Amino acid sequence: MDEPMNVPIENPSADTEWNDILRKHGIIPEKPPSPTPLIEEALTEARKQAHDNRLEGKGLDELEELEDEEDAEFLEKYR
């Protein structure tokens, strides 16, 4: 009765109820974690860094333009 069974599996990485049952019983390996949260975290960090570094290497004229743009954006959000 403890003989291993040969269970046909079309796609072991498919997200199906049957594959979940097989994973639960250790017949097929667990799915690797989704990389989506890591990608979203990296994008958030990149946006933050880009925002923090937006003033580096800018001349006086460019800084004044940026200040005007940010003031206009703030006033538009405030309305």
Image (spheres, helix red, strand yellow):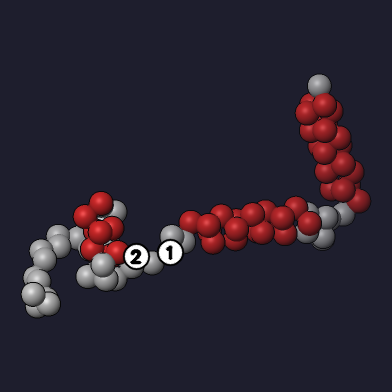
Secondary structure category for the residue under label 1: loop
Residue 71 left/right relative to 43: right
Q: Residue at x 27, y 71 (%)?
A: 26
In the rendered image, which quarter contains the N terminus? bottom left
Amino acid type at mark 2 = Lys
Q: Mark 2 and mark 1 in contact? Answer it, CB < 8 Å.
A: yes
Camera-nearest residue between 73 and 33? 33
Residue that mark 1 sits on:
33
Q: Position of residue 51 (x, y in %)?
A: 75, 53
What is the quadrant of residue 48 in the picture? bottom right
Camera-nearest residue between 64 and 36? 36
Amino acid type at mark 1 = Pro
Residue that mark 2 sits on:
31
What is the quadrant of residue 33 in the picture? bottom left
Q: CA distance from mark 2 to mark 1?
A: 6 Å
Q: Position of residue 43 (x, y in %)?
A: 60, 56
Whether residue 33 is visible here, answered yes or no, is: yes
